[in-house]
Image (cartoon, rainbow, N blue to C red):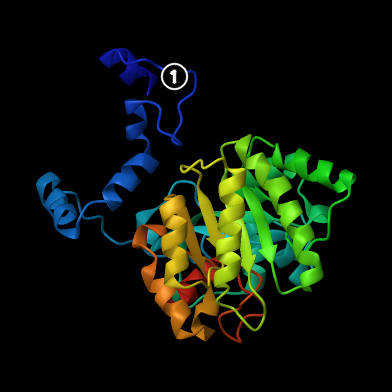
């Protein structure tokens, strides 16, 4: 990017940014190129393939290992490539009585193998830590980065109001240079309504930190048990976010475990176009209105997630895990 700025005599910013894009040179970043490619029609994509005569890579045998290896550099011979968007590594380790230092690969092996037709190749994951007592150390966050695992630090809305000590612990973990997401945070109306106001106060306080660091904000928004559609909750949270973010329309959000209707999808995208909607195996048990909400999500704003260890796809598995994402794709 620096060489391009020098070559074309463009002003070079002190730091290159993708949100917002602050230099034409940023358009050579792979994220920018992927975003531009997603805007092209299938016909144009096919024409590009023919024009540039992209070589066909012969298939190679999958690794003997029963679970895919997490790779920072994808090998296109290993099948469907995915970057897994949301799971709880600490809770998954606890479900199998594994230590916090257990490698990601060993965690997947504890969960179990995947049939070949449902296997995916993980190029990376986002591990979400939202329990103040389980925040990883700076050393642990760095070690996870070497395994291809990005880290999100948040506070689950079911956690009661944080003490100042635990809030400082959260801030210390979130400030780590390798932490790229704030979350999950949000509102959860499955608890008694007497706690809702405290949830909003804590949500607002923590959300303010998104203005201090270039991060994705991961939102946990869950309605009352008798109302999984949760239209009122999604719209109430949108109002709070608009106030806190000072109408920063470029902020990226991940609405984790989304179950809302189509008008909620439209409302969020209208105010924050960089909103992504995560869908889990829960989609199989939702009603027609939620299915219409799923259909309303643009293809380039749809994320598949398992919310591991929750929502195991079959009885063959004690818990869900990132390498079981093929089942979620089938459910969707």
Q: Which of 103 and 303 is in front in this view?
A: 303
Q: Quadrant of residue 263?
A: bottom left
* Left or right, residue 167 beside residue 103: right
Instruction: Say whether residue 104 is visible.
Output: yes
Tag 1 residue: 13
Name the one closer to the observer, 47 or 215.
215
Q: Position of residue 193 (x, y in %)?
A: 77, 71
| Residue 51: image location, x then y, percent | 10, 46
The percent position of residue 49, horizontal first and vertical second, equals 16, 51
Split into 4 quadrants, where in the image is the N terminus?
A: top left
Q: Residue at x 45, y 60 (%)?
A: 267
Give percent across and percent down for residue 200: 72, 57
Q: Residues within 10 Å of mark 1 (few under 14, many from 20)?
A: few
Q: Which residue lies at the image location 52% right of the left edge and 42% below the top edge? A: 247
Q: Is residue 118 above or below residue 302?
A: below
Look at the picture and state if 154 lies above or below 1.
below
Q: Which residue is drawn at 19% across and 50% down?
A: 55
Q: Which of 256 and 32 is in front in this view?
A: 256
Residue 296 is left or right of residue 204, and the answer is left
């Amino acid at each position: 990017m620096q060489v391009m700025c020098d070559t074309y005599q463009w002003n070079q910013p002190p730091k290159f940014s993708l949100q917002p894009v602050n230099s034409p040179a940023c358009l050579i970043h792979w994220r920018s190129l992927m975003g531009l490619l997603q805007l092209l029609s299938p016909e144009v994509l096919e024409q590009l393939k023919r024009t540039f005569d992209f070589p066909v890579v012969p298939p190679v045998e999958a690794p003997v290992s029963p679970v895919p290896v997490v790779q920072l550099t994808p090998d296109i011979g290993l099948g469907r490539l995915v970057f897994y968007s949301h799971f709880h590594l600490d809770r998954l380790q606890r479900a199998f009585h594994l230590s916090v230092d257990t490698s990601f690969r060993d965690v997947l092996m504890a969960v179990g193998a995947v049939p070949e037709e449902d296997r995916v190749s993980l190029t990376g994951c986002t591990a979400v830590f939202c329990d103040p007592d389980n925040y990883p150390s700076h050393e642990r966050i760095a070690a996870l980065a070497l395994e291809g695992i990005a880290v999100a630090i948040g506070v689950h809305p079911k956690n009661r109001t944080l003490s100042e000590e635990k809030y400082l612990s959260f801030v210390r973990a979130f400030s780590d240079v390798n932490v790229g997401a704030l979350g999950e945070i949000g509102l959860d109306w499955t608890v008694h309504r007497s706690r809702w106001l405290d949830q909003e106060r804590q949500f607002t306080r923590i959300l303010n930190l998104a203005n201090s660091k270039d991060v994705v904000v991961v939102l946990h928004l869950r309605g009352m048990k008798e109302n999984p559609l949760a239209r009122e909750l999604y719209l109430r949270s949108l109002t709070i976010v608009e106030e806190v973010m000072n109408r920063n329309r470029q902020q990226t959000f991940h609405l984790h475990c989304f179950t809302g209707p189509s008008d909620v999808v439209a409302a969020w995208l209208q105010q924050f176009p960089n909103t992504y909607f995560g869908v889990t195996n829960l989609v199989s048990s939702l009603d027609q209105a939620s299915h219409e909400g799923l259909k309303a999500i643009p293809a380039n704003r749809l994320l598949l997630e398992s919310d591991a260890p929750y929502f195991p796809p079959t009885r063959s598995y004690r818990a869900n895990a990132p390498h079981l994402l093929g089942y979620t794709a089938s459910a969707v």
